[in-house]
Amino acid sequence: MRTFILAGILFLGLAIGETAESQETKLNVRLISGNVYMIDNSVAGEFGRGNSAVLVGDDGLLLVDADALPDPRTIITGLQGMFNKPIRYVVETACGGLLALSKSIDSIVAVDKARRRVEQKKCWRGYPLVLPTVTFEGEMRLYLDGEEVRVLGLPTGKTDGDAMVYFKNANVVATGDTFVSSTLPLYTIFEGGNMLGLAEELRRIVASVPADAKVIPGHGPLASIGEVRKASVALDGIRDAVAAQVDKGKTLDQIRGMNLLEPWKDQIGNNGASIPAYLQSFYDRLRGPPEPDFQLSPDPEKNR
């Protein structure tokens, strides 16, 4: 498998018009199958740095998720320099977006709800967002240099605007944060997510692509469809375990004392430190309807 390391001086800034600072940035780009590459940030050891997928064609590039690094321009500038081709399409798998540099990109694709969230400023990415220019409901197809790219909307799970991208000829699927190979996924209450829908999203991915497809997850190393299925089963198991106690009228504090999620400790990851978050997320959803949207805190750290 080929691996490219791009090292150069790329210019970063929080917003267009600010004084840019330069720093050395590396993109770990791996060829996965056909002409589909993975920007693999699992090697960075930082969960906040997600992965991206790139289709390289004769006429240009198609990029899935441009916000995997702290500043999308890092990826855009790096890829254009590496392949010497323009980025023709950016597909966002959730409520993502690009900076003003996106004016050089032909089309930004996302599901309808993701655009509406950007319009209403109901999503947070730590930098100014621009609106997707192409939206859809259900499914759409793009064709680029012989590759058929299927973009499928997913049920509400991680957010209410999730999507997956399947490269048919290369047999590679990019899941966004719906699937995370290093841990189990969590929903985002700030963008309309629903913890109970995450397992259904994972089932939709499994049902939509061949069993031998390679999986580029939102975070973590390259994975398999079997791992996606295993994550779905785990989320169903956690849901059922918590639901059984909710049905008995147990409070959250009582459930916390039961060591209920011990069987899934390894999959939850972080040495079990994240167990309270999963426990409360399922408990809250099983106890009542999804929370309504609410205003984001001016402190970005509270919006994670």
Image (cartoon, helix red, strand yellow):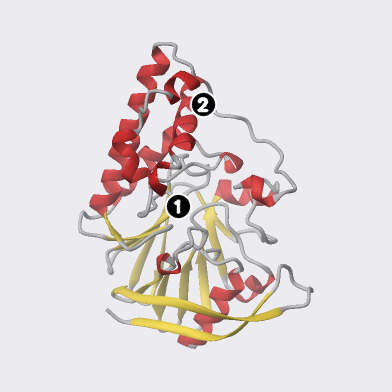
The spot of residue 257 in percent (x, y) is 42, 23
* Residue 86 at least partly seen: no
Residue 257 placement, left or right of 14: left
Residue at 48 percent across and 58 percent down: it is 47
Note whether 67 is above or below 190 in the view shown.
below
The spot of residue 9 in percent (x, y) is 60, 86
Res. 46 mark: none
Question: Around disc 1, counting alpha carbons within 10 Å, would you say few (fewer than 14), some (14 to 19), or many (20 or more)?
Answer: many
User: Which mark's residue is nearer the viewer, 1 or 2?
Assistant: 2
Residue at 40 percent across and 80 percent down: it is 57
User: Looking at the figure, which quarter contains the N terminus?
Assistant: bottom left
In this rendered view, identify the residue nearer to me: 82 or 252: 252
The spot of residue 67 in percent (x, y) is 55, 63
The residue that disc 2 covers is: 284
Q: Amino acid at mark 1?
A: Asp
The residue that disc 1 covers is: 177
